[in-house]
Amino acid sequence: MPGRFSIGRAGGVALALLLLAQGTTVLAQTKAAPPKAVPTAPQIPAYVTQAPIVMLKDLDSGKILYSRGADERFAPASMAKVMTAYVVLDLIKAGKLSRDTEFTVGEAEWKKWRAGNGGSSMFLAPGEKVSVDDLLKGLITVSGNDAAAVLAVGIDGSEAEFVKRMNAVSTSLGMKSSKFGTPSGWPDGGVTKVSAADLVMLADRLIRDHPAAYARYFSIPKLQHGTAPDGKPIVQPNRNPILGLAGADGLKTGHTSEAGYCFLGSAKRGGRRLVMVVAGMASDKARREEAARLIDWGFAQPSRQRVAAR
């Protein structure tokens, strides 16, 4: 009929086949399109260490980032002084002791712990009157055994009585694997033993319970106290091996032939605080390198990820 467009049967079939082929091609092209890349977080290598005892905890999330031998009991050496410091700070907080209180250095304590007897000292002199504030600085900054003894005797009349207080407080904190025999951590025939898990718990409580005191005492770079034979003042550096690292601000080293080189440390970066224990290292250098490597690795971990190794 004039004016009307028509397609014959054969033409209709051909057109249908053409449209089907084009649709198939478009569909095939659509299916073949590669998926869009989804960004992923960079993979952080697992922590590898030869240290016999290592623990790293994120205090804000409560997550254990790394754990090896954390429940094994070992001699803490001078890390025991953190327990002594906690006891003293608790007494100050309770109003039973003042930072300004002065204790007199007894002859017996001086003879036992004076410099040259094999242990660390803040160089107290017999008969010297020293404030609790200065004794805490000497205890923590330069690991003074003499400071620990004078605090113990000044507070409870003897080191033995003060040790009873230490053990009572550690029990109240839930430190189930720990027992103290001295306020200084000096070798005592195997009496003083702790676990890395207990030390991390102690550090956590000290930082939370006494934040101002922690800031006041645990990151002092050096201590001047005492006079050398040549008349010059004695200045000793802080023994903390990571104090130069970003955010590092505590806590305490330890070393004896029995314990090896140990460290209970903490650092805070970007509002996130980590606490570590490294124990049984063969040298001061090994301890320093291990501690620095561990804390940097810890801060590289996602804040809420658990990465534990036994």
Image (spheres, helix red, strand yellow):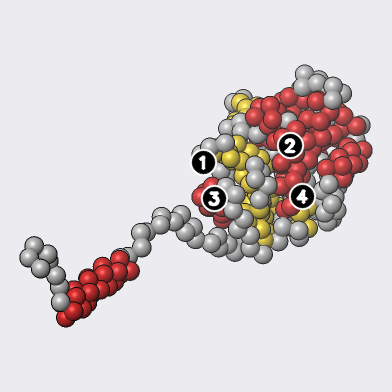
Characterize the local packing of mark 3: few (<14), some (14-19) or many (20 or more) Cα atoms within 10 angstroms: few
Q: Which residue lies at the image location 59% right of the left edge and 53% below the top edge?
A: 305
Q: Which residue is mark 2?
A: 206
Q: Which residue is mark 4?
A: 198
Disc number lying in front (3 or 4): 3
From what the image shows, is residue 279 above or below residue 155? below
Q: Secondary structure at mark 4?
A: helix
Q: Secondary structure at mark 3?
A: loop
Disc number lying in front (2 or 1): 2
From what the image shows, is residue 204 above or below residue 279? above
Q: Which residue lies at the image location 58% right of the left edge and 40% below the top edge?
A: 272
How many numbered badges does the structure rendering display? 4
Name, please, the residue furthest toward the left.
2
Q: Is residue 12 left or right of residue 288?
A: left
Name, please, the residue furthest toward the bottom.
10
**N-term-proximal mark, 2 vs 1:** 2
**N-term-proximal mark, 3 vs 4:** 4
Disc number lying in front (1 or 4): 4
Q: Which residue is mark 3?
A: 302
Disc number lying in front (1 or 3): 3
Cα gap from disc 3 to disc 4, whole angstroms: 24 Å
Amino acid identity at mark 3? Pro
Q: Which residue is mark 1?
A: 245
Characterize the local packing of mark 1: few (<14), some (14-19) or many (20 or more) Cα atoms within 10 angstroms: few
Towards the viewer: 257 or 301: 301
**N-term-proximal mark, 1 vs 4:** 4
Q: Secondary structure at mark 2?
A: helix
